Image (cartoon, coloured by chain):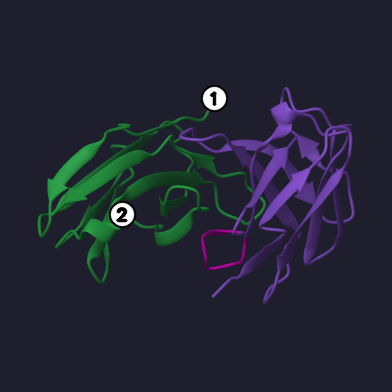
Amino acid sequence: GAVVSQHPSRVICKSGTSVKIECRSLDFQATTMFWYRQFPKKSLMLMATSNEGSKATYEQGVEKDKFLINHASLTLSTLTVTSAHPEDSSFYICSARQSNYGYTFGSGTRLTVV
Amino acid sequence: QKEVEQNSGPLSVPEGAIASLNCTYSDRGSQSFFWYRQYSGKSPELIMSIYSNGDKEDGRFTAQLNKASQYVSLLIRDSQPSDSATYLCAVALSGGSYIPTFGRGTSLIVHP
């Protein structure tokens, strides 16, 4: 089956610093990956669609300069939260789809900004 | 505006009963339908995918799709307390690059 690996699973950082989250498709190539954030007891919110070799497509209201997405290869997409603030604390999840499978999620990254 | 509607619940069923989760969608062009289970604090896990009208069974789970009525459901037989989670319905056009639309999820509680 399709496996998506996401790291780190948990990170605590200081306000003003940047945090990079990696998302890898382990046994398939993913030209498109999706980045979500989720607040406690709330639904998934799509932040952006990551496209291999081109710029990411951001959803309305998501600051592209704050949430930098790089999809440099067919198996790796990264999300960098720049100049993090406490309000950026959330659960970030990536997703990709392999043919004949549904959209597979990474295990998520719980970001806490202090 | 593509929409996927789910009753937020909670849906409470006794252990051993059948849990029925429902989902409606607005985009008639939708081709792919998925059910995910999400435990608190964890990421969603794919349970079932369905692409054709009718029923699809996998163990205790049965997905039902009716494209004419724009309706997809998930039945969980012999519900267990470990099935207690939020169930997300997702709908997409065909192809991996199409953005899936997720419902808000239905909270299921299976009580002993």
Q: Position of residue B104 (x, y in %)?
A: 43, 34
* Residue at image mark 1: B1
Q: Which amino acid is tagged 2?
A: Asn
| Element under disc 1 | loop
Q: Is residue A77 magenta?
A: no
Q: Position of residue A52 (x, y in %)?
A: 83, 56
Placement of the N terminus of chain B among the 4 image quadrants? top right
Q: Which residues are magenta?
A: A97-105
Q: Nearer the viewer, mark 1 or mark 2?
A: 1
Residue A31 occupies which quadrant of the picture?
bottom right
How far apart marks 1 and 2 lie (CA) works out to 23 Å
Q: State the residue at coordinates (26%, 35%).
A: B10
The chain painted purple is: A
Residue A28 visible, this orientation: yes
* Residue at image mark 2: B53
Query: From the viewer's perspective, is A106 left or right of A43?
Result: right
Q: State the residue at coordinates (34%, 44%).
A: B67
The chain painted green is: B
Q: Are marks 1 and 2 on the same chain?
A: yes
